[in-house]
Image: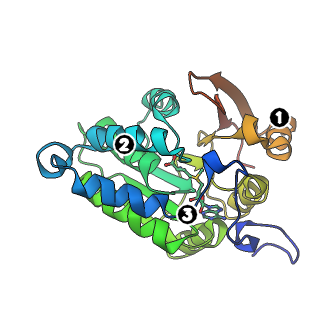
Amino acid sequence: MPPPNTFTSDTFGARQPFTSDAFGFNDGREVGLRDYIFSRPDVETKLRNDPQAVIDAISEHNAKKGMITLGRAKIDKCNDLLSKLDPPPKTLVELGCYVGMSAIGWGDSLKKLNESTSETCKVFTTELDETIASVARDLIALAGLDDVVTVLDGPAAETIRKIKTEGQIDTVDVMFFDHWQEAYLPDLKECENLRVLRKGTLILADNTDVPGTPDFNQYLEDSNKYHVERYETEAKMAKIVLAATVIEVP
Ligand SMILES: C[S@@+](CC[C@H](N)C(=O)[O-])C[C@H]1O[C@@H](n2cnc3c(N)ncnc32)[C@H](O)[C@@H]1O
C-alpha cells in the first residue's frame, strides 16, 4: 500500500483533459462512435475480426469528431518499438483505455509478435468511466481480440494493485501511460512499489509533450534506473512518444 497522502490515480475522479470544445470528452461522442461503427453496412463483412480495419474505422470517425484517441502515427511508432523487443512482449498494461483504439492496436500487435509460439499474450487496459469502458469492450470484441484484451473498470493504480495481488500479472513487458497526466508520476511510483517493472520493461507514454508531464519526464530523466528516448511522429499534436526502458529494477 502507498503511504497516506500519496497521490495515485485512485485519487482521481473524472476530469476534462482538454478545455477546447474540439477535444471534449465523455459527452456522448463515445457512445456515438459505437452506434456509428455497428450501423455500418460493412460491420460484419469488413470489420468483424479485423483489428486493423476496426482501428481505421475508429480513426476515420474520431478525426472528424475530434476525439482523444492515440492516432495511427503513434500506434505505428509504438508497434515498431514493440517489434524490436526480444523476446517479444507477452504482457502489456495500459493506463487509460478510452474507446479501446490503442488497446486493439496492442492486442493485434502482441498476437502477431507471438504467433510463431504457443505462448499466450495478455493486454490489461484500465478505464475510469464505465460507459466508455463498455464501448471499448464492444469494439475490442468486434475486432476479435476479447480473448487477449481485458478492459478493467476503475482507477489505474487500484486496478494494477488488484491484478498483481490476484496473480493475473507478475512483472509486465510493456506499460503504456495514456490516462490523465497528473496521475503519470504517482502511478509510475505505484508500479515501482508493486514490483511490476522488471529489467527490460518498456514504458511508453503519450501526451508527455502536450499537454505535458514535466514531473514524470523529470523523474525518469533524473533516475539512473531508466533509459529514456523520445520519438517524434507525424501526429498533428502531441507528436512525441516517450519510451523509457528499465535498466535497473527501481
Ligand atoms: C487519452 S484517453 C486514452 C486514449 C486511448 N489510450 C486510445 O488511444 O485509444 C484517456 C482515458 O483515460 C481515462 N482515465 C483517466 N484517468 C484514469 C485513471 N486514473 N485510471 C484509469 N483511467 C483513467 C479517461 O477516462 C480516458 O478515457
Q: Does label 1 or label 2 sit earlier along the sequence?
A: 2
Depth check: 17 or 5 in front? 17
Q: Is residue 114 visible?
A: no
Numbered tag placed on residue 27 in the rendering: 3
Q: Residues within 10 Å of mark 2 (few under 14, many from 20)?
A: many
Q: How many marks?
A: 3
Determine whether the residue tagged by mark 3 lies in a helix, strand or loop.
Answer: loop
In three-dimensional space, the C-alpha distance between marks 2 and 3, rounded to whole angstroms, equals 32 Å
User: Position of 129 compared to 111: left or right?
Assistant: right
Q: Which mark is residue 97?
A: none
**In contact (CB < 8 Å): disc 2 and disc 3:** no
Residue type pointed to by label 1 = Glu
When asked about the image quadrant of residue 241, the answer is top right
Q: Is residue 120 above or below residue 133?
A: above
The residue beneath circle 1 is 221
Mark found first going from the N terminus, 1 or 3? 3
The disc placed on residue 110 is 2
Q: Is residue 155 left or right of residue 116?
A: right
The residue closer to the viewer here, 136 or 205, is 136
Figure quadrant of the N terminus: bottom right
The disc labelled 2 sits on which kind of residue? Answer: Leu
For the residues carrying marks 2 and 3, which lies nearer the camera in this image?
A: 3
User: Which residue is more in the foreground, 124 or 182?
Assistant: 182
Rendered location of residue 157, percent (x, y) = 66, 67
Image coordinates for residue 132, horizontal then vertical, percent = 48, 66
Amino acid at pointer 3: Asp
